[in-house]
Image (spheres, rainbow, N blue to C red):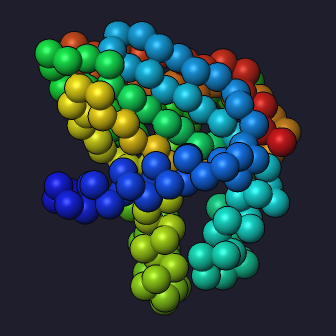
């Protein structure tokens, strides 16, 4: 992804998170370790649905997206000597039965929007609100975005996050997230 495009995602995400009340998201947890800080908040069904409907996405697609748990994730690099990187394809959701599932990323959702012929302005608004699938952080960089995780609303799950600092791999879990 080009530098300017990445900066656009960062700006859009910052606006989303910095919005007063951040769409009234409920705080869940913050982790801070190995040069990485992540904060995760859940969005209620109506909050998430109204956000995407207001950006021109059709109701059937919005309902499919928000039927599962929608979370806001804000990440920050606290390392000054090495880059921190993350790849959403390495993250998992662990369900109550112990099964781990991959999280559907932005590219898959965008392909569906393209197939349905969704207006470009709505696709761009959706894309900018999503957590990037790959990101590199320099010292002090932050990035934010939303995810729809494969968990039924009302269920508890663990979010397993993985990242790298230089060549060193790290993992942390936020456990027992409950989505309303």
Res 108 quadrant in image: bottom left
Residue 100 in picture, x, y percent from top left: 57, 29
Q: Residue at x 81, y 35 (%)?
A: 155
Q: Which residue is drawn at 38% across and 55% down?
A: 11
Camera-side residue of 53 and 155: 53
Q: Residue at x 64, y 69 (%)?
A: 52
Residue 153 in picture, x, y percent from top left: 80, 45
Q: In this view, does 44 lie to the left or right of 78?
A: right
Res 114 quadrant in image: bottom left
Q: In this view, does 56 lie to the left or right of 50?
A: left
Let me know if residue 56 appears in the view: yes
Q: Which residue is drawn at 71% across and 31% down?
A: 27
- Does residue 123 lie above or below 105 as drawn? below
Camera-side residue of 28 and 23: 23
- Does residue 172 lie above or below 66 as drawn? above
Q: Is residue 161 left or right of residue 100?
A: left
Residue 43 in picture, x, y percent from top left: 72, 47
């Amino acid at each position: 992804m080009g530098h300017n495009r990445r900066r656009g995602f960062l700006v859009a995400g910052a606006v989303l998170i910095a919005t007063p009340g951040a769409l009234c998201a409920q705080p869940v947890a913050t982790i801070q370790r190995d040069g990485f800080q992540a904060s995760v908040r859940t969005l209620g069904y109506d909050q998430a649905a109204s956000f995407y409907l207001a950006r021109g996405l059709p109701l059937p697609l919005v309902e499919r997206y928000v039927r599962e748990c929608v979370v806001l994730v804000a990440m920050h690099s606290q390392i000054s000597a090495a880059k921190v990187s993350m790849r959403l394809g390495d993250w998992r959701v662990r369900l109550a039965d112990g099964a781990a599932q991959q999280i559907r990323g932005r590219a898959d959702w965008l392909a569906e929007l393209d197939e349905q012929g969704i207006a470009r302005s709505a696709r761009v608004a959706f894309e900018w609100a999503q957590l990037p699938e790959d990101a590199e952080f320099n010292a002090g960089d932050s990035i934010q975005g939303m995810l729809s995780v494969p968990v039924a609303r009302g269920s508890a799950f663990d979010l397993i996050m993985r990242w790298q600092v230089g060549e060193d791999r790290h993992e942390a879990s936020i456990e027992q997230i409950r989505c309303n």
